[in-house]
Amino acid sequence: MEKFPVINLANINGEEKKATLEQIEDACQNWGFFELVNHGIPHELLDRVERLTKEHYRKCMEKRFNEAVGSKGLERVQDELKDMDWESTFFMRHLPTSNISEIPDLTEEYRDAMKEFAEKLEKLAEELLDMLCENLGLEKGYLKRAFYGSRGPNFGTKVANYPACPKPELVKGLRAHTDAGGIILLLQDDKVSGLQLLKDGQWVDVPPMRHSIVVNLGDQIEVISNGKYKSVEHRVIARSNGTRMSVASFYNPGSDAVIYPAPPLLEREAKEAEIVYPKFVFEDYMKLYATLKFQPKEPRFQAFNALNSS
């Protein structure tokens, strides 16, 4: 198996720019995932977010999770559970408006750390979108504008913990799916693994690495790139020992943004491109995705193509 792509952004604005962009291009075309080091987010901030996320889980979420497991009798299950995930989660929104101050049980220190982290991630996400634009031959800012809608992008963070599971062979931490949105930036546990992606028909581990940010592409990038870049199926496997932390931030189009393949790509690739992806309003795509998240993405695209042609 080829080595999972780890990309060093230290010299992205210097003499290594061309080589770094080539690595990103290869990762986008062949993996849909890559891991960033020297990404510009201070290690101290990453350590603080990790510490506070784990503290919050232990103080506020762990008991609730164990009670839920007990109430459903999951410890006595003998057959594979295909309709649930072994995870404890909550969601915070940053853009277009933040709800961090409204989420109960968060300490002020945790709120402040997540606000600071979100600002850094937003900047990194927009820098990465421009790197994708450069690789795709689109003008700088094209993807950010495509995502903008009338109120700017949707940007939020799913904070998840995957507790130790007594029967990991019977349940997934998170079932296999592609991400519906744009570009996803993940701070994951550097000790407990579990995230896997599907490559060439095989499940491949995304290696835990201290202070790295894992990036993956969502369905909207696949549509705008007209399939040059693909969103990739991934899952979290349950583990019998250790709780895995995951802080995944989703930089997505605005709800009313109209998403469609970039016209310059269609013109340039008219002869090569067999598939033309659909045009839709992002919010409509999300409504469909909510009912079909754990099913293949192709029928979602086909549904909008059928709507557009009727």
Image (cartoon, helix red, strand yellow):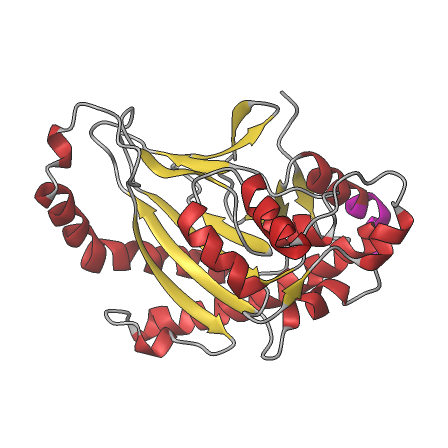
**Residue most extreme to the top:** 1
Q: Answer yes or no: is residue 15 visible.
A: no
* Left or right for 310, reference 195: right
**Which residue is located at x 9 percent, y 45 percent?**
71
Q: Pinpoint residue 250: horizontal percent, then vertical percent.
A: 52, 59
Q: Pinpoint residue 164: horizontal percent, then vertical percent.
A: 25, 36
Q: How many marks?
A: 0
Q: The C terminus appears in which quarter of the rendering?
A: bottom right
Quarter of the image holding residue 134? bottom right
Main SS class of the magenta portion in the image: helix
Query: 67 or 46: nearer the eye?
Result: 67
**Which residue is located at x 62 percent, y 47 percent?**
36
Q: Answer yes or no: is residue 75 visible.
A: yes
Q: Which residues are magenta?
A: 14-21
Q: Is residue 175 above or below residue 261?
A: above
Instruction: Specify whether residue 112 is painted magenta.
Output: no
Q: Pinpoint residue 229: horizontal percent, then vertical percent.
A: 71, 43
Instruction: Specify whether residue 18 is painted magenta.
Output: yes
Q: The N terminus appears in which quarter of the rendering?
A: top right
**Residue most extreme to the front:** 310
Q: Pinpoint residue 270: horizontal percent, then vertical percent.
A: 88, 45
Query: 40 or 224: nearer the eye?
Result: 224
* Left or right for 48, reference 261: left
